[in-house]
Amino acid sequence: MNLLMSCRAIAVALVLTAAALAHAADTYHVVHAYPHDQQAFTQGLVYVNGHLYESTGIEGRSSLREVDLETGRILQFHVVPDQYFAEGLTDWKDMLIQLTWQSHVAFVYDRATFRLLRTLHYDGEGWGLTHDTKSLILSDGTATLRFFDPETFHEVRRITVKDSGKPVTQLNELEYIHGEIYANIWHSDRIARISSATGRVLGWIDLKGLMPRDQLSNDEAVLNGIAYDTAHDRLFVTGKLWPKVFEVTIIPGKAKLVPVLHSKQPK
């Protein structure tokens, strides 16, 4: 093998070695488990200034709630009209904004009193809702996340969420944490960490085993609910019809070697 071919072989080997390195999904440690209403079909979860707020779904059972985290006691309860299937929830200034699934309507409430202030309209379905410093961010079950002006609810931009170039669909409940968008993947035990600028998946959080299935009585009792306490850097997660809200810390995944198919090197 001449010198040029030897250098090429070394370069190829280095590229293959680099490509073989990948990061395992992040895992979790449970800090504390809090009681949660097992009749709550959780669609949105928000923690603001020491208060936990929750949006629950299903026509005829949808609600907006303020919940005492420590005891699970409902402190304030608003019944959403029967024709609506309530979905994602976020805060904005001194308000709460609650999506509906297929009615193209969002409700804006005074956060302190739950008094309805106005309604907003949007195209497509509403699944999850969060916000960054400028925009509301909405998921609709596809790989697209849409950004809206909080005052007018006019769309200002959108991103397509992709992992290794492939679209990631079933994006559900959202939370904005440290400049990233965390998204539940419906009917899975995983949360995607997404770049809010590009839509690229930055990593995965695997919450498998957090809520044992033998403690749940419904196939739709799936992971869905992310809330972040910015003041104390605490992350809360729950699910639809789950009996608990969990405070968790994330354990970073370690780099691992992924088997690759090596091509035959020149002699």
Image: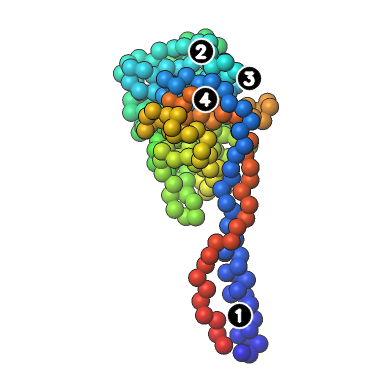
Identify the residue under disc 3.
Answer: 49
Task: Please tell me which residue is depicted at 57% across the width and 64% down the height of the picture.
Answer: 19
Residue nearest the viewer, comparing 20 with 183:
20
Identify the residue under disc 2.
Answer: 74
Please provide percent x and percent y for residue 24. 57, 51
Answer few, some or many: residues within 10 Å of disc 4's Cα (few below 14, many 20 plus, some between 14 and 19). Answer: some
Residue type at mark 1 is Arg
Residue nearest the viewer, comparing 36 with 142:
36
Q: Closer to the N terminus: mark 4 or mark 2?
A: 2
From the viewer's perspective, is residue 58 above or below residue 173?
A: above
Identify the residue under disc 1.
Answer: 8
Residue type at mark 3 is Asn
Instruction: Give the quadrant of residue 230.
Output: top right
Dots 3, 1 in contact, CB < 8 A = no
Q: Residue furthest left?
A: 83
Task: Please tell me which residue is depicted at 68% across the width and 27% down the height of the picture.
Answer: 232
Please provide percent x and percent y for residue 146. 45, 37
Q: Closer to the N terminus: mark 2 or mark 1?
A: 1
145 to the left or right of 220: right
Identify the residue under disc 4.
Answer: 244
Q: Closer to the N terminus: mark 4 or mark 3?
A: 3
For label 4, the SS is strand
Please provide percent x and percent y for residue 71. 57, 15
Q: In this orientation, does residue 186 appear?
A: yes
